[in-house]
Amino acid sequence: MMEVHVIRRENRHLYTDILEDYFRIRHQIYVVERKWTELDRPDKREIDQFDTDDTVYLLGLDGRAIVAGMRLVPTTSPTLLSELFPALALNGPVRRRDVYELSRIFVVPNRRGEHAGPRAEAVIQAAAMEFGLSIGLSAFTIVLESWWLPRLLDQGWLARPLGLPVNINSLSTVAVIVDVNDEAWTKICSRRSVPGSTLVWQGLSALERHPVRDPVAAV
Ligand code: COA
Ligand code: U4Y
């Protein structure tokens, strides 16, 4: 099964080639396939204003080949919700040290819709929850197309809307907050046949793995 590597400021030098592939794959998926043309750039790497030193990437790798990805941005930094779509959150965007925003989930085309073993999509989602638990988060926010809602509930995640759905680029889009807790992780693992921990923390120290564990500091 693929392993899911945690890539952040402190260890990204170990993944230079992989990150180069990653931004090119994002171009292929989001600009070419999904036609999110506002993200097109002359260098054909899909990198936006939320790809910063604070961003964490979870990359599902088979050897050195990228199978799946997810992006996580602390809500204390600028996010899709705070900068681009604030109208999706009726009480204003969430800004908390213990809440990260998830975005840019993908599975490469030839690994989608798999049936044998756990699906790459489920493994990357479970990995996000495992990451949240590991660093002491209490929730994720997500700006997503509304077709995701039944999928999240079906995988055992409690997704609560932060506001009403709005049409963005002709698609119904909504902001949600999802609790990070053991139950959400065990549910997705048991419902989607994910056997357990998949995260690889190569080059990251214990401190970098648990930056917001202190519950007082997390508020
Ligand atoms: N609109 C509506 N429903 C969609 C969808 C879309 N753009 N993409 C996937 N789905 C739903 C459909 O119900 C689909 O079943 P169908 O093919 O029978 O219609 C189901 O999800 C399964 O999708 P599939 O792509 O076969 O498999 P997957 O579960 O392995 O992967 C994604 C799902 C979303 C990770 C994958 O399709 C992907 O990487 N897409 C491109 C990136 C993307 O759009 N990400 C979400 C925005 S960040
Ligand atoms: C950007 C301008 O799919 N526009 C941008 C930028 C809404 C719109 O946002 C536009 C993105 C899945 C894009 C699209 O039309 C989450 C998910 N999130 C989207 C994302 O970008 O990843 C945003 C909502 S789509 O053109 N847009 N970026 N400037 N910089 C998700 C994640 C985790 C899961 C489940 C689903 O658990």
Image: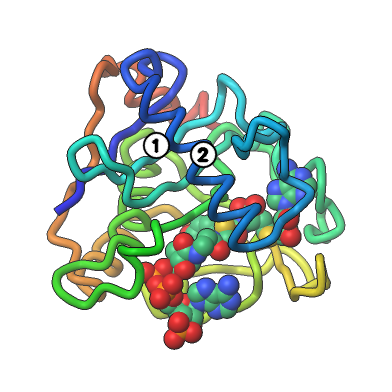
- Residue 93, horizontal then vertical, whole percent: 76, 47
Q: Amino acid at mark 2?
A: Arg
When the figure is inspected, residue 150 is found, relative to residue 192, above or below; the finding is: below
In this rendering, position of residue 112 left or right of residue 19: left
Where, quadrant-wise, is the C terminus in this rendering?
top right
Q: Is residue 10 above or below residue 64?
A: above
Q: In the rendered image, is residue 82 in sight? A: yes
Q: Residue at x 72, y 43 (%)?
A: 40
Q: Quadrant of the N terminus?
A: bottom left
CB at disc 1 and ligand 2 closer than 8 Å? no
Ligand 2 picture quarter: bottom right
- x and y, in percent, of residue 216 in the image: 50, 27
| Coordinates of residue 203 in the picture (x, y in percent) | 26, 16
Q: Looking at numbered disc 1 in the image, what kind of residue is underneath it?
A: Gly
- 98 vs 129, left or right, is right
Q: Nearer the viewer, residue 134 or 101?
A: 101
| 76 horizontally vs 14: left or right | right
Residue 24: mark in rendering: 2
> Is the residue 37 above or below the residue 164 in the image?
above
Residue position for label 1: 136
Q: Of discs 1 and 2, which sits in the foreground?
A: 2
Q: Secondary structure at mark 2?
A: helix
How far apart in space, not on screen, are marks 1 and 2 (Cα)?
Answer: 31 Å
Nearest the eye: 135 or 66 = 66
Residue at horizontal 35%, vertical 68%?
112
Q: Residues within 10 Å of mark 1 (few under 14, many from 20)?
A: many
Does the image show residue 178? Answer: no
Q: Position of residue 46 (x, y in %)?
A: 62, 39
Q: Earlier in the sequence, mark 1 or mark 2?
A: 2
Secondary-structure class at tag 1: loop
For residue 50, which quarter of the picture? top right
